[in-house]
Image (spheres, helix red, strand yellow):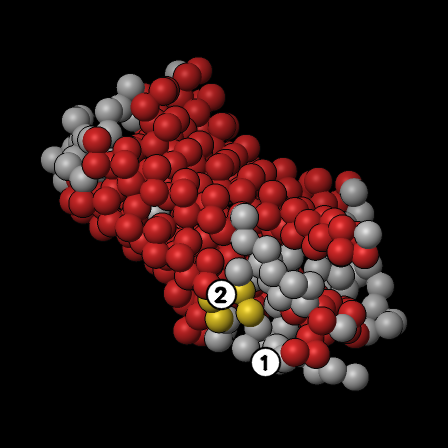
Amino acid sequence: MTRDRTAMTIGARLRSGDVAILAAAATYGVSTTVSVAALHTVRPADLLAVELLGAAALQLGAAAVTGRLRWRGCVPQLLLGALSPGLTFLLGDLGLARTSASSGSLLLAIEPLLSALLAVVILRERLGGRAGLALAVGFAGSTMVALGPRTQGEASDSALGNLLVVAAVLASAFFVIALSHHSRTSDTRNHHDAASDSETTYDGLNASAWQTTGGMLAVVPFVAGSWISGGSRLGTAGPAAWAACVGVLVCGAVAGVAFNRGIARVSAARAGLLANLTPAVGMVTAVIFLSERPAPLQLAGGVFILVGLVLILRTSRALGESIGLTPPAATADSTTDASAALALSGSREPKLD
């Protein structure tokens, strides 16, 4: 009975974070396909303006109406937002305007690997055995999709587009590490601060609202310069193009909130592994909605990616450890309630009272 109750507790604590990261990953995959559809008509600066300005207004409004908008701690979130969605969306939209949705989606398979490896190197997180296997399987799948032949219909400068997408992925990977460290530091501080109130609690909607605002402010010079030099196509865009732009806006807003909610509950390395779902969803939606046809090698890579996801989701560790990931300072005594809370919140150096 005690063991069943403990298993249920572990599942409940991990399920919300896992589901949030997976929801964000799937939504980002859909967003990649919708972005390419929009960029068939509008310019990258147009799409940036719609998705970031609209998402910032939507999230700030929702946070204000629900009473969750907090000025305290907004500056670090604004700076994080300049990295992602700011730089990440800028490079991504420039790249997706030059390559296919399936190629762009499959290149996103690099991000989970970079995030997981950076988490190990920078945050000193240690991969458990099954998580290491999941990383290896995911790497194999990513290699297969990256080395696959180009899809038909790619632009002549698709190589440049692919490089821009890779640069966006690198920026996003660093964002994951920076956000994970910031959110866990805030969450752990609140765990030990008996006097903390709702104003200091890390909140996904509040964080995402400020990050999107920071990203919007960061790309204003590019958007303004692009419109001055080449104008905008939003005025001549039809209903379908506007629907695609709004779809990207909604996807970005929803995925941002979901990711911020999840990253405070799972480790950065695990979030990177779970994000393997993004390229698979992007590839499937590109095939269904844009009639793109990935090569068999790319499809096989997608299967490997999904297998890696199954491995990491089926990993089960004792209470006091993130599933598949072991904090570097964890000891045999880390099954106590105090150290378990620290481990689940991603503390690098849990202290036993």
Residue 24 or 344: which is nearer the viewer? 344
* Residue drawn at (79%, 61%) of the image: 199
Image coordinates of residue 290 in percent, x first then y, are 32, 21
Residue 94 or 179: which is nearer the viewer? 179
- Tell whether 87 sits left or right of 312: left
In three-dimensional space, the C-alpha distance between marks 2 and 1, rounded to whole angstroms, equals: 14 Å
In the picture, residue 74 is in which quadrant?
Answer: bottom right
Image coordinates of residue 171 in percent, x first then y, are 38, 58
Q: Quadrant of the C terminus?
A: bottom right
Residue 19 or 153: which is nearer the viewer? 19
Q: Is residue 214 visible?
A: no
**As drawn, which residue projects farthest toward the left?**
156
Please name the residue that numbered disc 2 is placed on: 128
In the picture, residue 188 is in which quadrant?
Answer: bottom right
Kind of residue at disc 1: Ala
* Residue drawn at (41%, 43%) of the image: 307
Which SS class for mark 2?
loop
User: Within 10 angstroms of label 2, few (less than 14), some, or many (20 or more) residues?
Assistant: some
Image coordinates of residue 211 in percent, x first then y, are 56, 54
**As drawn, which residue projects farthest toward the right?**
195
Which SS class for mark 1?
loop
Position of 5 relative to 307 (above/below): below
Please name the residue that numbered disc 1 is placed on: 329
Image disc number at residue 221 = none
Kind of residue at disc 2: Gly
